């Protein structure tokens, strides 16, 4: 069955309704507006020489954002909000210590204090770095208040939430961008550069994921009050975008192709519960906590144009961190974690005096040639700003490049690199993978949030900045330890 719009998607998945509610998924099938096309694709707002930012949520991610964003010429932190007063005070003190402009308004102490921040007419952009449950309410409220939204990941968890963000963004003509920093990593942008240049040929397959041992963080540190409880109630891939975003960029998702359907399967749960037994004494509340989410989830996505993507998620096993970052095409393969590359005809075996093209199928480029290749095809954005980003930090510089790029686009009236349709497509995997897992890995259609506009959408294009337009000089940028430690 071919499904193109929201009404058809809801009809096609009606058989899942009872199971979805049992699984804790929130999609109800409530009808919003039925628009045609994707008016926020390529959307440009009027250039904003000065971008006024309000930051909501001042934990690890939010405090790092304050530090990074305040370093960008033409951007000013004008408002801060956190339910904990001491977190607001800490950032005000930091700005004061750097002799930067202080926020004109600060809010704390009440759960919905963020609404007053959004209501102010002195803010252009809301930067939301709160726990997951607040991402959608803040984004919707902020757009209705006339603000552009930059929201942490995952920006949404259900298909209904994705649709509502899409339609409110379209109605208000306000950007709603997911802060997917991994799209701006050096290796991920190298992957994009190779894909756009045709070096790898026509891409047909990708692998990505989020493999990150978070057992201690979930049981006793920063995630115990919200992420742990989410994992306890849900199955499927509830954190897909770090790995999926860069692969979706490379494959032109929503820009010439789109996600069609998926199947999802996962292992049983062992990692979280074993960690609790090994580390906590008899009677501790953690010993009785059951976790629904399996250790490893594998979701397979088929696109409308026939590409296949494998997405993995595992946050409860003792494994080294990886996002995988693999794309394979008709001329070669890129593998970002660990960094490896193969280009057909360039890896050869010598048989006597004869070189055999394709004979190198048993090897990737050696270390020296791989480094030569990396420098030759390094993404322009990293060539331009990589040294500055390394000084500021934040996951190796990707956080700063992400913030610098959206600020540059707003200042110069350019479309943002990630729009609300990217947000919706990537985040819809959360609910849809859970539905598949809870229904014996049956296939589930992914809705077309662009309503057909993906067929004629412009490619992502060259992402770069002109530092001189921003007055940004490497010598003026200092290393920020807080950003480096996030």
Image (cartoon, rainbow, N blue to C red):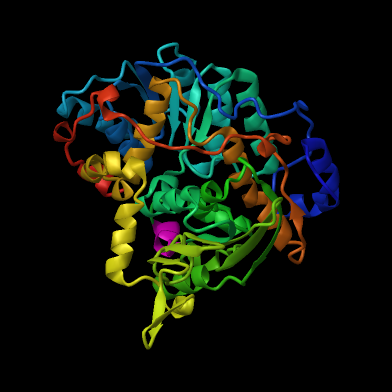
Question: Which residue: 67% across, 27% down?
Answer: 167
Q: Is 383 left, or right, of 249 in this rendering?
A: left
Badge count: 0
Judging depth in this view, the residue of 43 and 196 nearest the camera is 196
Looking at the image, residue 41 lies above or below residue 198 = above
Can you name the residue that lies furthest to the bottom here?
352
Judging depth in this view, the residue of 294 and 380 nearest the camera is 380
Horizontal and vertical percent for residue 422?
58, 40
Query: Is residue 108 within the magenta segment?
Result: no
Can you name the residue that lies furthest to the top here?
121
Looking at the image, residue 445 lies above or below residue 127 = below
> In terms of image quadrants, where is residue 217?
bottom left
Question: Which residue: 42% across, 17% down?
Answer: 123
Looking at the image, residue 197 lies above or below residue 216 = above
Where does the magenta region start and end? 211-220
Horizontal and vertical percent for residue 244?
54, 52
> In terms of image quadrants, where is residue 35?
top right
Horizontal and vertical percent for residue 259?
67, 49
Q: Is residue 264 visible?
A: yes
Question: Which residue: 65% across, 57% down?
Answer: 307
Judging depth in this view, the residue of 97 and 451 nearest the camera is 451
Horizontal and vertical percent for residue 326?
49, 62
Judging depth in this view, the residue of 387 and 119 nearest the camera is 387
Q: Is residue 59 visible?
A: no
Can you name the residue that lies furthest to the front here?
353
Q: Majority secondary structure of the magenta segment?
A: helix
> In terms of image quadrants, where is residue 232?
bottom right
Q: Is 4 left, or right, of 403 in this rendering?
A: right
Q: Is 9 left, or right, of 346 in this rendering?
A: right
Question: Which residue: 48% across, 35% down?
Answer: 417
Query: Is residue 212 within the magenta segment?
Result: yes
């Amino acid at each position: 069955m071919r499904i193109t719009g929201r009404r058809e998607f809801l009809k096609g998945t009606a058989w899942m309704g009872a199971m979805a509610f049992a699984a804790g998924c929130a999609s109800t099938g409530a009808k919003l507006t039925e628009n045609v096309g994707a008016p926020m694709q390529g959307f440009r707002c009027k250039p904003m020489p000065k971008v006024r930012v309000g930051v909501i949520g001042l934990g690890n991610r939010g405090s790092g954002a304050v530090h990074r964003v305040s370093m960008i010429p033409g951007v000013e932190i004008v408002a801060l909000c956190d339910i904990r007063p001491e977190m607001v005070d800490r950032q005000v003190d930091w700005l004061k210590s750097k002799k930067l402009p202080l926020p004109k308004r600060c809010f704390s102490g009440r759960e919905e204090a963020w609404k007053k921040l959004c209501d102010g007419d002195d803010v252009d952009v809301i930067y939301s770095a709160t726990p997951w449950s607040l991402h959608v309410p803040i984004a919707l409220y902020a757009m209705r208040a006339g603000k552009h939204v930059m929201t942490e990941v995952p920006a949404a968890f259900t298909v209904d939430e994705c649709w509502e963000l899409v339609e409110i963004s379209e109605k208000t003509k306000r950007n709603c961008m997911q802060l997917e920093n991994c799209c701006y990593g050096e290796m991920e942008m190298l992957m994009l550069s190779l894909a756009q240049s045709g070096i790898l040929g026509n891409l047909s397959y990708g692998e990505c994921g989020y493999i990150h041992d978070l057992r201690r963080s979930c049981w006793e540190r920063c995630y115990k009050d919200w992420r742990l409880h989410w994992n306890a109630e849900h199955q499927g891939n509830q954190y897909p975008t770090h790995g999926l975003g860069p692969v979706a960029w490379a494959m032109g998702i929503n820009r010439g192709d789109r996600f069609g359907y998926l199947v999802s399967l996962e292992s049983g749960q062992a990692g979280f519960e074993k960690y609790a037994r090994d580390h906590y004494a008899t009677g501790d509340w953690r010993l009785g906590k059951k976790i629904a989410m399996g250790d490893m989830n594998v979701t397979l996505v088929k696109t409308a144009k026939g590409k296949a993507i494998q997405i993995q998620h595992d946050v409860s096993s003792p494994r080294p961190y990886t996002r995988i970052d693999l794309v394979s095409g008709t001329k070669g393969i890129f593998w970002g974690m660990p960094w490896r590359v193969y280009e057909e005809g360039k890896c050869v075996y010598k048989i006597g005096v004869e070189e055999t093209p394709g004979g190198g199928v048993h090897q990737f480029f050696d270390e020296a040639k791989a480094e030569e290749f990396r420098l030759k095809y390094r993404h322009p954005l990293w060539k331009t700003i990589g040294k500055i980003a390394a000084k500021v930090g934040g996951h190796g510089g990707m956080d700063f490049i992400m913030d610098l790029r959206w600020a540059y686009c707003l200042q110069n009236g350019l479309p943002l690199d990630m729009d609300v349709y990217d947000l919706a497509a990537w985040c819809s995997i959360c609910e849809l993978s859970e539905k598949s897992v809870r229904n014996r890995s049956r296939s589930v259609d992914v809705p077309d949030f662009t309503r057909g506009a993906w067929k004629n959408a412009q490619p992502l294009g060259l992402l770069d900045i002109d530092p001189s337009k921003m007055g940004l000089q490497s010598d003026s940028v200092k290393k920020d330890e807080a950003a480096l430690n996030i």
